[in-house]
Each structure stands twice: as structure tokens, then as C-alpha cells.
Amino acid sequence: MGMTTLLDLLDRIGGASVLVVGDLYLDCYVFGRPISISREAPIMVLNEDRQEERPGGGAAPALALAELGSAVSIAGVVGLDAEAQRLRDLLAGARIDGAGVIVDSTRPTTTKTRVVAEGFLLFPQQIVRVDRQDRSPATAGIERALSAAIHAAQCDAILISDYRSGVVTEQVVAAVREAQAVRGVLTTVDSQGELAKFGGFDLVKCNQSEAEALLGHALGDRAARERELSALRARLDCHCLVVTRGGDGASLASANGDGDEGGYAEIPSVNRSEIFDVTGAGDTVVAVMTAALLAGGTALEAARLAQVAAGVVVRKWGNAQATRAEIAAEISKLGPDELTTA
């Protein structure tokens, strides 16, 4: 797989429509500069400089898709509060259709507030995070509303982003699976542990620790990874399984007949040294792979492009996205060894 192949695939992505279903968060940041140590407790005192708000959680892959030119809509749950309106406004500002965002007046909009110190280290340093959320499963009424939004969506793919905050229930997954069976939409998921819930999906993505938790033991050497992850893919009955392994890249187990070289590949990490913040890397992988598969790329090509995009994102602070130009520039810098798969 050469540079030209990846650049051609990058050029083709975007334009397709994707519905993102997941747990919606409002990420709030309070930035300040250290001025002293508190006399009340052994903690830093910051002088506040500014505040920022960004969509987070399941909205992260939606932002990544929108950045790459996809037509993105989103379905999830918010509360009846001011945070919900701010989240809706941020999504609209990112050209994301929020018609499928359902209000549940019994729970708050999930809000994660981070206090960040600047000016004393090279990069901003997160001091503390305060979460306000209700992780209880969505009620039957909310499930019906989400299912209706899924059935009404005119889309080429449905991406589930499961942050395990109550939205991605069995009923909601069943609605997505029905859309797959009836309308033939591509189904992809970034699962944070409950992989078995997504049997039959086109793409299931998780990280190494989540795969190991399901297997019940640590992944071994390459031969063991190939054997066990290929068996896990078959067990899940998904077209392809991607397991991200941090600086070690990613493992891809895929069904035969999709143009890949065999059913298993390991894709090296593009950026192992300039890692500033890994937030959003997994969201980037599932978003880019979804867009690449919609553009006609094979699972192997999609995984390779996703690793390049993730290498861009980890250089940025916070929940950031990779632009098309940044990904193209990264591809152009790759050497022959970095464009091959193991």
C-alpha cells in the first residue's frame, strides 16, 4: 500500500451521510495560570484566564466526520438544562444535524469540567476533572424516541459511539441492526467493552485492554494475536474487528474477500514520539475508517488511513480533529517502511 493509494482514498472520502448514535457530553474547560499554593489545602491556586466548551463523548467522532466533509447527523440524549442548549449550539456550529437529540428531563446533560493550568509547563496540564452525569440506562420512552430517530435517518452509515453512559441499550442497538438489514446501511461501532452486544456489525473497534477483558487474558505475541483476534472476529460475526494498541499501532482482523491481503494485518503507529494528548484518538480511528469504507476503501486501507489521522490528533491538546490537509501532509512524510503492514 503506497502513498498514492492513501492519498487517493483521502481524496474520495466525505460527501456520504453518517448518523452518529451515542452518549453526548459537553466538555467544559477552565484555563488559568498558577499564582500560588492555597493556604486551605496543598493545592495550586489558578488565576482564571478563559473558559472553553466543546462537544464531547459520542459527539467526538461526529466532529471528526464533519471535518472530513461527511454529512453528519447525531442521535443521543440531553437533559432539560442550559448545558443542553449550549451543546446543541456547538453541534450546529460544526454543521452537525441535531434533530435526533432527545430530551430526558429526569437526567442532566452529561457535563465534564476540566480545570487546566497553563504557563508553568510546556503544555497545559489538567489539574482536576469534575463529572456531572447519570449513567442509568435510557428509559423505555427514550429508547423508543431514539429508535424512531434511527429509523427516520436518511444515511449511508450508522456509527455507534458507546461511552457506556446509558444511551446505547440493547433496544437502540436492535434499531441500528434493523436499519442495516432493511436499508443496507454500513454499521460501525467504537465499543468501550461490551463487544458482544454488536455482533453482526460491519466494523467493531475497541482498544487492547477492552479486547483482553473479553478474552480473559493478555494478548500475546503476533502469532497469538492473529489467532485470537481472528477467532474473536468470527465469534462476533462482524466483517472486521480493529483493536487499537497505542504506540504499537492497531490489529485488524477482517473477513476474506474484501480486497485485503488475507484476514489479519498489523498496522504500525505513524507517530510514536510526538504524543501530547491521546484524547480523541479512538474517536478519530472509528470516524476515519467509517468514512474510508463508505468511499470504497478496503478494511486494510481504511485502518491504515485511520492510523495516520490518529497520529495527527495525538499532537493536539484536548478533543481535537484532524483536517484533510493535515492528514495529506502526514502521508507525504511517510517513509516506505511506514507504509507497509506486518
Image (cartoon, rainbow, N blue to C red):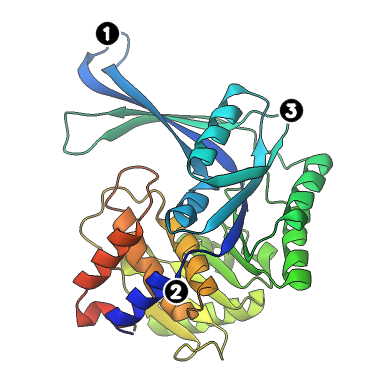
Residue 196 percent across, percent down from the top left? 66, 66
Q: Quadrant of the C terminus?
A: bottom left
- Give the foreground label among 1 and 2: 2
The amino acid beneath tag 1 is Arg
Q: Residue furthest top?
A: 39
The amino acid beneath tag 3 is Thr
- Which residue in the structure is indicated by mark 2? 302
Say which element carries label 3: loop
Position above or below: 49 against 208: above
Q: Is residue 15 left or right of residue 139?
A: left
Q: Quadrant of the N terminus?
A: bottom left
Residue 172 percent across, percent down from the top left? 74, 54
Q: Judge by depth and name the residue closer to the eye, 273 or 1.
A: 1
Local packing at callout 1 (Cα closer than 10 Å; few below 14, some 14-19, many 20+) is few
Q: Is residue 1 left or right of residue 274?
A: right
- Which residue in the structure is indicated by mark 1? 39
Position above or below: 331 against 190: below
The amino acid beneath tag 2 is Ala
Going 65% across and 74% down the picture, which residue do you hit? 236
Residue 174 percent across, percent down from the top left? 77, 61
